[in-house]
Amino acid sequence: MAVQRMDNVGIVVEDMDAAIAFFVELGMELEGRGEVQGPFADRCTGLDGVHCDIAMVRTPDGHSRLELAKYRSPRAIDAGASDRPHNVLGTHRVMFAVDDIEDTVARLRPHGGELVGGIARFEDSYLLCYLRGPDGIIVGLAEQLR
């Protein structure tokens, strides 16, 4: 077997504390924080002089993690507007299953969460929405209907 599991999804952020607060409010748990730098980081990323702060947050079940990275050097590149539409090439989103989508959206609003569109019903199966968080990160929320 080539793949054992998906270990994490990496997201570059400008405001580490805001990103952590957003994902903790979503229900994730801060696993740890640290710094990454040195020859291994340069080689892995293909950049020179890498120095970044990282934070790992995980889902309550312990199976999924996000690695948040704030680059000290080289400085992060602003790829343009943080309100890019969902269909831009290379744009990604991370989808989370939630118990109550409306409550989750309400709790994330004070942390910068804004609906991209609206909460939509998919047949009698799910309520779904995309929410834009810190630094324009698109987060999908899915509430399974019973």
Image (spheres, rainbow, N blue to C red):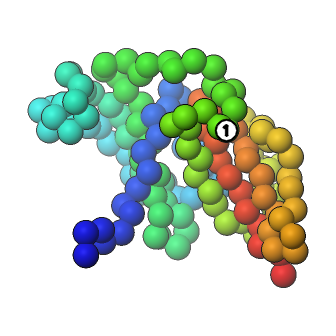
On screen, residue 52 versus residue 31, left or right, reads left
Residue 26, image quadrant: bottom right
On screen, residue 146 versus residue 5, left or right, reads right
Measuring from the top left, give residue 35's x and y in whole percent.
29, 37
On screen, residue 55 versus residue 19, left or right, reads left
- Which residue is drawn at the image coordinates 83% and 41% (left, top)? 117
- Front residue of this view, candidates 79 and 114: 79
- Front residue of this view, candidates 123 and 11: 123
Residue 5, image quadrant: bottom left
- Which residue is drawn at the image coordinates 20% and 39% (left, top)? 44
Quarter the C terminus occupies: bottom right
Measuring from the top left, give residue 72's x and y in whole percent.
35, 22
On screen, residue 112 versus residue 66, left or right, reads right
Measuring from the top left, give residue 48's x and y in whole percent.
20, 22
The residue to which callout 1 is attached is: 86
Which amino acid, mark 1? His
Callout 1 environment at 10 Å: few (<14), some (14 to 19), or many (20+)? few
Q: Is residue 63 above or below residue 57?
A: below
Residue 99 visible in the current orientation: yes
Q: Residue furthest left?
A: 39
